[in-house]
Image (cartoon, grey):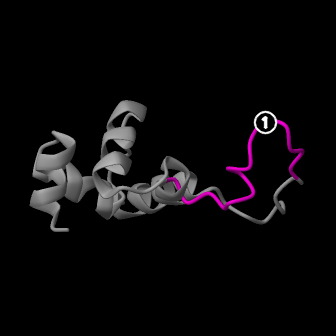
């Protein structure tokens, strides 16, 4: 699916989709839901979470390793580095 097609399906401006993919910005939750729906993938997959995180509230999950950086934080750092 092209960025233009995704933008149309998620009702988002195509420039905004480019910003999300470049890591310059992060979508609001409602926009992320619309993008995941348009792509027909679970929101957890869009967020970069493993199947274990999507297991549900009744399952106790182990803590992630301390050296692991959350994908959203990684995008924020990359965007900040690009601004320098």
Q: Is residue 83 left or right of residue 68?
A: left
Q: Which residue corresponds to the image point at 38% horizontal and 50% vertical from the top-left?
A: 36
Nearest the eye: 67 or 41: 41
Asked if 16 appears above or below 31 in the picture, the reply is below
Specify whether residue 71 is painted magenta.
no
| Magenta stretch secondary structure, dominant | loop
Is residue 79 visible in the rendered image? The answer is yes
Per the image, the residue denoted by label 1 is 57
Looking at the rendering, in which quadrant would you find the N terminus?
A: bottom left
Question: Residue 84 sits in which quadrant?
Answer: bottom left
Provide the residue span drawn in magenta.
Answer: 47-61
- Report x, y in % for residue 59: 86, 44
Quarter residue 2 falls in: bottom left
Q: Is residue 61 above or below residue 5?
A: above
> Residue at 30% across / 63% down in the picture?
22
Q: Position of residue 16 (x, y in %)?
A: 19, 48
């Amino acid at each position: 699916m092209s960025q233009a097609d995704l933008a149309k399906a998620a009702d988002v401006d195509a420039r905004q989709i480019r910003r999300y993919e470049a890591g310059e910005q992060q979508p609001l939750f409602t926009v992320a839901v619309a993008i995941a729906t348009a792509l027909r993938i679970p929101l957890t997959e869009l967020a970069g979470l493993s199947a274990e995180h999507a297991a549900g509230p009744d399952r106790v999950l182990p803590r992630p390793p301390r050296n692991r950086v959350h994908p959203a934080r990684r995008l924020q750092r990359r965007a900040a580095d690009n601004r320098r």
